[in-house]
Amino acid sequence: MAGIIRKIKEWVKAYQIEEFASKDQILETYLNVISMGGGGKNIHGVQLGAKYYFSKDVGDLTLEECAFLAGINNAPNTYNPFRDEDEEAKNNRMEKIKNRTKTVLSKMLELGKISQEEHDAAVQKVDEGLNFQEGQISANVYSYHTDAMLAQATKDLAEKNGWDEDFADMKLKSGGYTIYTTQDTALQERMEEEFEKEKYIMYSKQNPEQHTEAAMTVIENGTGYVVGVVGGLGEKTTSRALNRATQGAKQTGSAMKPLAAIAPALEEGIITAGSVYDDVPTTFAGMKKDWPKNYDNTYRGLLNVRYTIEISHNIGPVAILSELGSNKAVKFLKDMNFESIDPEQDQTLALALGGLTTGATTLEMAAGYSMIANGGEYIEPTFYTKIVDKDGNIVLEAEQERKRMMSESNAYIMQSILFQPTIGSSGTARYCAISGMDVATKTGTTNNDYDRWLCGFTPYYSAVTWYGYDENPETIRYRGSPSNPAGSIWDAVMEFAHKDLERKRFTVPDDIKRVTICRDSGMLAGDYCNEDPRGTRTYSEVYVNGTQPTEKCTVHVKAKVCEADGTVKLANDNCPDAVERVFITRKDSDKNESWKKATDAKYMLPTETCTLHTTPVQRPENTINNTIDNSIKNNINTNTNTNTNTNTNTNTNTNTNTNTNTNTNKNTITNTNKNTISNSVVNQVITNTVNTIKNPNSD
């Protein structure tokens, strides 16, 4: 049955061909693409066959030489006279060559294509031995960009005309077409130069014959034109071999965070750049305990989206994807033609960290990042613009899908977030900065450093680089600077791409507003945010108007604490040296104590109250007032009964204790004889006391 189906397909193909080509045109095309063997040289077409076997142009071949080439098409390498083998095997092969060539000559005589005389003369030369002379074939090695262009053009040509791709490929090669590509030749050559550098080649410890590989795609923003692409390290020696940039899907690591979590969540209104998530050990639904961890094995605590991307921590993006829904993230990627994404298997929270069934190519990732650079519009990348025939008629034009993925304003927010790895003090790609240019970047690293990525863009270009091993992944131990080899390649290529371009920044949409917020709460800066022991926690954040916070920070609080025992505890009323400090708080911190493993735990408001101080402490409220008070009382005790009208008082109107404020008979300043201290005396006492305190050494 399979054979019947194959034959039917061949009939259909033959019918399709004869719809637009004559028999002579079909034969010419066939002779230009037929396999001629050549061992590893993989020669196609009778012209190259003539060069390889006889060191001649096809027009200079003799009859018997033509018969040889015509006869080997069923198994060309079987009749290769240049194979390195012992004498007996070589003699057997030469006998096969003679018999095969004579068979062709006999058939030509039978069909009347040659005369008996021509036949006999040719057979005699065959018996004497064909004059094989191996020619030097300088293979026309296409660039990786040309490889990708031919693959895309072949597919598009087949779809447009209803052909299968084999026929479309043959037509593309032999139809006399002119193809207008999107390649920037200078940039392509610079990329190839960088990829050929020995410093990037590291041989596997598992398989000494295997070495590291890399791939890179550069897209011109605004057009979707792929201006440069390289699919492997080292010098390219064959055409249309594996192109890792377009065919090699790899695990992306954190480079997927902006596309699978942050961008769609911004567009859905779930987050802003200032939204805060707690970077602490977390167990998400359906995932193992305390997953994920961070690459540096630390937890920073309260982190906003912007800083999370700057330092590439993992808890926030997974939490965001959990809120967004992995189904929406998958749809977001599929809408940008991520063909490598499995719509069912990849609907997990691991998607936020690039945990994919297959992975993604640098072409797919570059197109996704270019969407952000394009103000939220996805443009399908293309390697060519048009194909014309020998008469100048357009045979095929590139049709690029365009799709709005994000609003222009949300795209700007995403752009600004991705500036952080380049410009932030803790950024993971600071080496990618270009003077006077906005540069957005994101690194990516998979488990055990098996894969390294650098994705990013400027107002001009979006570029993505992958670096790793093809098979049997192993840890990358690159010793260069920077330590990320993908970043090193990216930086070198992008520096070249922008060297003659005008310095440029991204345009800020009209509805973008700047607001001063607290980085720990994501709320408007409050009264205590600048008094945090780490320094000010406020900064200026960008928002799409209407999404900015409206309430002041509630995370920072001020409290009195006691530090007498060497720890910080809430002060009680008896603590003599209580001080005011500013702390941070967390919602439900008493129910979930995972925050205690975060580096910001030491700034949390204490929950314990001081137990060291239990006895009330008597302390004057005011030194001057207390001194005045005691002076007045002493004067009272001295002048209690100076009135000339002496009245006997059975209770003896005197103070029994001159050092206290009371007497045993509860008599105060006034007695039964209504003897009092005059105002002038009190005023004089106050004046003298104040002067004494101010001038303690005066007489």
Image (cartoon, rainbow, N blue to C red):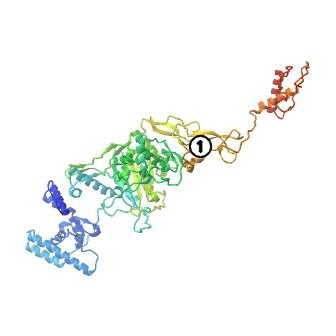
Give the camera-side residue of 131 and 11: 11
Give the camera-side residue of 432 and 626: 626
The residue where tag 1 is placed is 535
Give the camera-side residue of 10 and 72: 10
Give the camera-side residue of 288 and 677: 288
x and y percentages locating residue 683 in the rendered image: 81, 24
* Left/right of residue 447 with respect to residue 679 in the rendered view: left
Give the amino acid type for the residue marked by disc 1 in the picture: Gly
x and y percentages locating residue 326 in the rendered image: 40, 48
Q: Residue at x 28, y 80 (%)?
A: 86
Query: Image height check: is 137 above or below 99?
Result: above
x and y percentages locating residue 19 in the rendered image: 14, 54
* Left/right of residue 243 with respect to residue 455 in the rendered view: left
Mark 1 is surrounded, within 10 Å at the Cα level, by few (under 14), some (14 to 19) or many (20 or more) other residues, namely: few
Residue 434: tell me if it is visible: no
Local SS, label 1: loop
Q: The C terminus appears in which quarter of the rendering?
A: top right
Q: How many marks?
A: 1
Residue 127: tell me if it is visible: yes
Q: Residue at x 85, y 27 (%)?
A: 665
x and y percentages locating residue 563 in the rendered image: 68, 45
Q: The N terminus appears in which quarter of the rendering?
A: bottom left
* Left/right of residue 208 with respect to residue 4 in the rendered view: right
Residue farthest along the front direction in this orientation: 650
Query: Image height check: is 103 above or below 651?
Result: below
Query: Image height check: is 13 above or below 614?
Result: below
Q: Residue at x 71, y 41 (%)?
A: 577
Query: Image height check: is 478 above or below 331?
Result: below
